[in-house]
Image: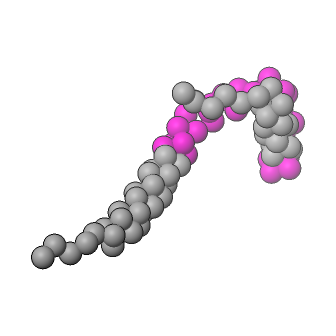
């Protein structure tokens, strides 16, 4: 299940998009236009960042499992 943005988070992002356009492009855009930009980012770009985060998390889990596995193996008793 994917994380759903709260109304407050979405409104903050829309405001940030409007500020970006004003400061970087010297262009005023409506709240509706900023919402469309946000929708584009969520649908087209966000999955790439999400998947990168998943791969990072997977690597961390694998590294931690490897350390745990090494620790468990140190508990083995020699067999005579």
Q: Give coordinates of residue 8: x percent, y percent.
A: 83, 31
Compared to residue 15, the image places residue 65 above or below, namely: below
Q: How many labels does the image show?
A: 0
Compared to residue 31, the image places residue 78 above or below, namely: below
Q: Is residue 42 magenta?
A: yes
Viewer-nearest residue: 22 or 6: 6
Q: Give coordinates of residue 26: x percent, y percent.
A: 85, 46
Name the quadrant of the C terminus: bottom left
Quarter residue 2 falls in: top right
Q: Which residue is drawn at 71% across and 26% down?
A: 36
Compared to residue 8, the image places residue 25 above or below, namely: below
Q: Give coordinates of residue 5: x percent, y percent.
A: 71, 30
Q: Which residue is drawn at 85% across and 27% down?
A: 30
Q: Is residue 27 magenta?
A: yes
Q: Which residue is drawn at 80% across and 51% down?
A: 24
Name, please, the residue furthest toward the front: 80
Coloring scheme used: one colour
User: Can see residue 52?
Assistant: no
Report the magenta residues as a range.
23-52
Q: Is residue 18 left or right of residue 56?
A: right
User: Can see residue 5?
Assistant: yes
Name, please, the residue furthest toward the top: 32
Quarter residue 40 falls in: top right
Q: Give coordinates of residue 49: x percent, y percent.
A: 55, 45
């Amino acid at each position: 299940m994917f994380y759903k943005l709260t109304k407050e988070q979405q409104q903050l992002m829309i405001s940030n998009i409007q500020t970006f356009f004003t400061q970087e492009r010297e262009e005023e855009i409506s709240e509706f236009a900023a919402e469309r930009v946000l929708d584009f980012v969520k649908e087209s770009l966000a999955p790439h960042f999400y998947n990168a985060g998943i791969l990072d998390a997977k690597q961390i889990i694998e590294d931690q499992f490897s350390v745990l596995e090494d620790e468990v193996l140190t508990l083995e008793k020699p067999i005579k």
